Amino acid sequence: MFVDIHAHLSFADYDADRSDVVARLKEQRVSLVVNPGTNVQTSRDAIALAEQYEFVYANVGLHPNDVHQITDDDFHTLDALLAHQKVVAVGEIGLDYHYPDANIPKQHQCFREMLRLAKRHDLPVVIHTREAWDDTFKIMQEESSSNLRGAMHCFSGGVEEAKKCLALGFKISIPGIITFKKSTLPDVVVALDIEDLLTETDCPYLAPAPHRGKRNEPSFVVEVAKKIAAVKGLAVETVAETVRQSAAELFAVSQN
């Protein structure tokens, strides 16, 4: 049974055929999907979808590229949404310096506030970081607590960054990028224990080979698990079961 810990399944990209997408993921034995929020509205949408499907869970989050118009009322709303029974983490949150108009001070403020909400609710966090490793680690360390834990979503760093994440209590979530020819993620996977890894699609983005160029979807997470298995010399069933157990423990959900 496979796991997709980061799938934007409530995005409009699936409005026309979401039921078909769900049918395909079931056919591929994907038994757990975690659907992240990126702002107030998408967090509400993630919860609504989680209410429809037993095997879908929601994250409530604030993406760093969505911080521009955030208000105090929005933080109060996010805080309230975190109490929902199908919400299993705060995410996705973090830092993204890729775009020239990035409001870095605002990103820092919001990242800290969301980490504090996670602490208050005793929830894991799902972190997005892009071209911002140093500041991401700095803020994580400054906001660290005994219950800080989570996943580094769509991991883009190297072995050194991965080991720093592990030291802070985070697992490394491997996306479909690992199947790309020039990907350095196989080096990271080789260096880590299988218990430290999770699998994701980040759909509708970053479809893995052999689906590159298509809209990504949760059923494609099987290709991620297959590649991890090949790199580590393990049976794909071993990878799938270990990841399933790790995800169930991290997000405190049933393994059935």
Image: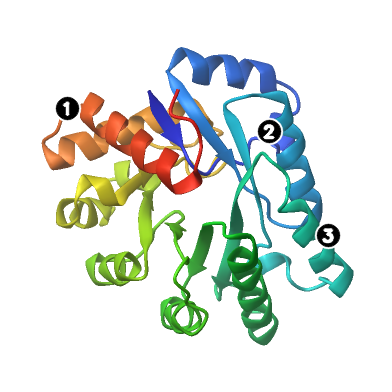
Q: Amino acid at mark 3?
A: Thr
According to the image, label 2 marks what residue? 50
The image quadrant that residue 239 belongs to is: top left
Q: Amino acid at mark 1?
A: Ala
According to the image, label 3 marks what residue? 77
Residue 7 point in image, percent of width and height: 56, 40
- Tell me the tag on residue 255: none
According to the image, label 1 marks what residue? 235
Q: Secondary structure at mark 3?
A: helix
Above/below status of 32 relative to 98: above
Q: Amino acid at mark 2?
A: Ala
Above/below status of 125 relative to 175: below
Of label 2 and label 1, which has the lower sequence position? 2
Q: Is residue 210 visible?
A: no
Residue 65 point in image, percent of width and height: 67, 67
Residue 138 point in image, percent of width and height: 45, 84
What's the distance in space between the residues labelled 3 and 1, CA to CA? 44 Å
